[in-house]
Image (cartoon, rainbow, N blue to C red):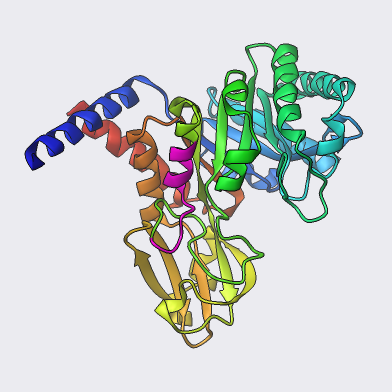
Amino acid sequence: MKFKLLLLGGLIFFSQKSSFAQKPFSVIGYYAGPSTTLDSFEVNKLTEIIFSFAHLRGNQLGIMNARDSATLEEMVRLKDKNPKLKVIISLGGWGGCAPCSDVFSSKDDRKTFAKSVKEITQHFHTDGIDLDWEYPAIAGFPSHKYKSEDKENFTKLVKILRRTLGKSKEISFAAGGFSGYIQKSIEWKKVMKKVDRVNLMSYDLVDGYATTTGNHTPLFSNSKQTESTDHAVEEMLALGVPAHKIAIGAAFYAKVWQEVADTSDGMYQPGKYKMGVSFKNFSKQLSADSGFVYHWDSVAQAPFLYNPQQRIFATFDDKKSIELKTKYAIEKGLNGIMFWQLHDDSFTDGLLDEIDQAKKDMKTIVSK
């Protein structure tokens, strides 16, 4: 029996790898940095870059200032380096969608919004819209309005966007990676018929409001933490979301807690959220020389650091966990991997490089 199970697993794995050989694998980077550093990143390793963020100006999509316009224009110029690169404009973000519930409740406002999206994509020569409404129908950013009707209104919004933009432009949305969102915010079967992709935010699963530490971007669940990348993916698949339209999320930053007890190396201990740290600054701010000790959760497949002298805990993605996430996405037949955000990465030898290498490694395995 054991031999048969192993053989079956091998056949399933081979089938998934074969599909990878035939289908493109998306690598999607959100970007919230300045226009001046964009050219320093290896954009040839991206399939999409997402401008973060546009906001609502009344009932229309608004690029808020000249700096944002310059960034968008520079993004489009990146196509000179990578002609296949798609440039997407994202609406909202955490704290950036306060009027969304009210505006998208109105049929006329949804229609006007969709028309404004089309006009802006034509003006900037971009390739589509990403909806980052955090969150329809459930509590998100403190003080932001939400109501149960948001769930249906989100579906209506996606439908009018598709009718207005046509089939040539992409429509995606950022989804909370936790059960409350997955079960309550979206009419999955209706929405997924109209969109190209859902960008699963499988990070911040322990958020900055938490008073207890944990893995904020784990690949798998463990006995003390149910929320994880795999848990969210399985929930979505069970609700009928097509695997080939799911991009899982990676974090190019750490979340850091202070005043954390020296028990279990700081994991699942009371603490006070301190700050986020970009991957490019790990070696300066979270170094072994400063007293940080590296640990690996072998069940969650996630790294963390603890500084027993300073009582500081950090949870993050690193090259090892990024490699595992990328290979997981390929093996599961998912659309790809996305991350927040490119400006947090190193110009060289960064996490984007690790995603690219993991893709190449999988292709090598398939070709043998």
Image quarter of residue 238:
top left
Find out whether residue 280 is within the magenta segment.
no
- Comparing 49 with 326, the one in front is 326
Compared with 108, 64 (above or below) is: below
The image shows residue 128, relative to residue 291, as above or below, that is above
Q: Which residue occupies 71% across, 21% down?
A: 125
Q: Position of residue 117 (x, y in %)?
A: 78, 23
Which residue corresponds to the image point at 61% horizontal and 60% vertical from the top-left? Answer: 207
Give above or below for 216 relative to 92: below
**Where does the image place residue 69, in percent across and percent down from the top left?**
79, 35
Q: In front here: 352 or 24? A: 24
Extreme-front residue of the structure: 148
Q: How many marks?
A: 0
Q: Residue at x 34, y 19 (%)?
A: 22
Q: Is residue 33 visible?
A: yes
Q: x and y percent of residue 166 in the render?
A: 68, 11
Specify whether 228 is left or right of 87.
left
Judge whether residue 340 can be spotted in this image: no
* Part of the protein shown in magenta: 223-235
Residue 101 higher or lower than 197, as above or below: below
Is 225 in the magenta? yes
- Tell me where residue 152 sits by quadrant: top right
Residue pictured at 10% horizontal, 35% vertical: 4
User: What quarter of the picture does the C terminus occupy?
Assistant: top left
**How far across and how far down the image is residue 61, in percent?**
82, 30
Q: Residue furthest right?
A: 58
Quarter the N terminus occupies = top left
